[in-house]
Each structure stands twice: as structure tokens, then as C-alpha cells.
Image (cartoon, helix red, strand yellow):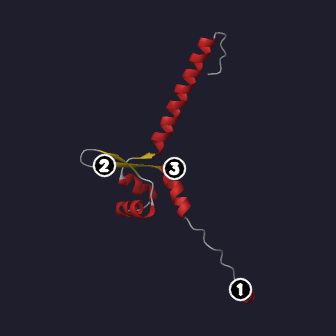
Amino acid sequence: MNILYDDSHSEMLGRSEDLRLDMRHAEEIRRIDLLESWKEIACFLGREVRTVQLWEKREGLPVHRHFHAHRASVHAYRSQLKAWRNDRSIPRPEHKMPAHAAFNS
């Protein structure tokens, strides 16, 4: 809200409305970032469900759990999965041709 108010109370209400809009925007971004099942997580990573479950146990795949009476539901955030995948990526060494091979080609 870009309107300036003379009354300090009205100005505080304007800031309060801005804060609510910011919170709604943040919640919308979080909802878009959310994956709510093993199947969605696996699809996002392009792997089978069993593979991503093993990655969680053995390689620290960032998966969150919400525990219920009988079973736990899982969820993950795309942004966290991307960061995990990027951290795991090992840069490939550049293949340099030996000097003598460059002359023969």
C-alpha cells in the first residue's frame, strides 16, 4: 500500500494490511514449492519411489514427516531437493587431450 496517512493509527493499519499480503504471498510460494508424497518427490527427481526412499535413509535426502496415529505422511520442498541435488553433483573433470594426440587429429 503506497498511500501515506496523516493519522498514525491509519498508517499502522496500512502496514498491517501489507504484512497480511506478504504473508499470503509467502504461503502461496510455499504451497507451490511443496511436494506431498513419495510419488511426487520421485517424479520431481526423475526416479522410482524406492530409490528416493533409499536416498533419504542413506544420503540425507531432505524429506519431512508429519506423524499420525498409524503412519507418517511425507513432504518435501522443491527448493530443498534442488539444493540437495546440486550439493551432491560432482563436477566432471575436463578431458584434456595429450599434446601428441592433438597433432594426430
Name the front one of labels 3 and 1.
Answer: 3
Q: In the picture, which quadrant includes the N terminus?
A: top right
Q: In x, y percent, where is residue 93? A: 63, 74
**Residue 48's image quarter?**
bottom left
Per the model, the C-alpha gap separating discs 3 and 1 is: 41 Å
Q: Residue at x 52, y 55 (%)?
A: 82
Labels 2 and 3: the sequence-earlier one: 2
Query: Dot 3 corresponds to which residue?
Result: 79
Q: Amino acid at mark 3?
A: Ser
Q: Secondary structure at mark 3?
A: helix
Q: Secondary structure at mark 2?
A: strand
Q: Is residue 54 left or right of residue 97?
A: left
Name the front one of labels 1 and 2.
Answer: 2
Query: Dot 2 corresponds to which residue?
Result: 72
- Vertical relation: 96 (above or below) 60: below
Q: Is residue 47 left or right of residue 26?
A: left
Labels 3 and 1: the sequence-earlier one: 3
Q: In x, y percent, where is residue 75? A: 39, 48
Front one among 83 and 69 = 69
Q: Residue at x 67, y 10 (%)?
A: 6
Contact (CB < 8 A) between labels 1 and 2? Answer: no
- Vertical relation: 87 (above or below) 80: below
Q: Secondary structure at mark 1?
A: loop
Q: In the picture, which quadrant includes the C terminus?
A: bottom right
Query: Dot 1 corresponds to which residue?
Result: 98
Labels 1 and 2: the sequence-earlier one: 2
Q: Amino acid at mark 1?
A: Pro
Q: Amino acid at mark 2?
A: Ala
**Residue 52's image quarter?**
bottom left
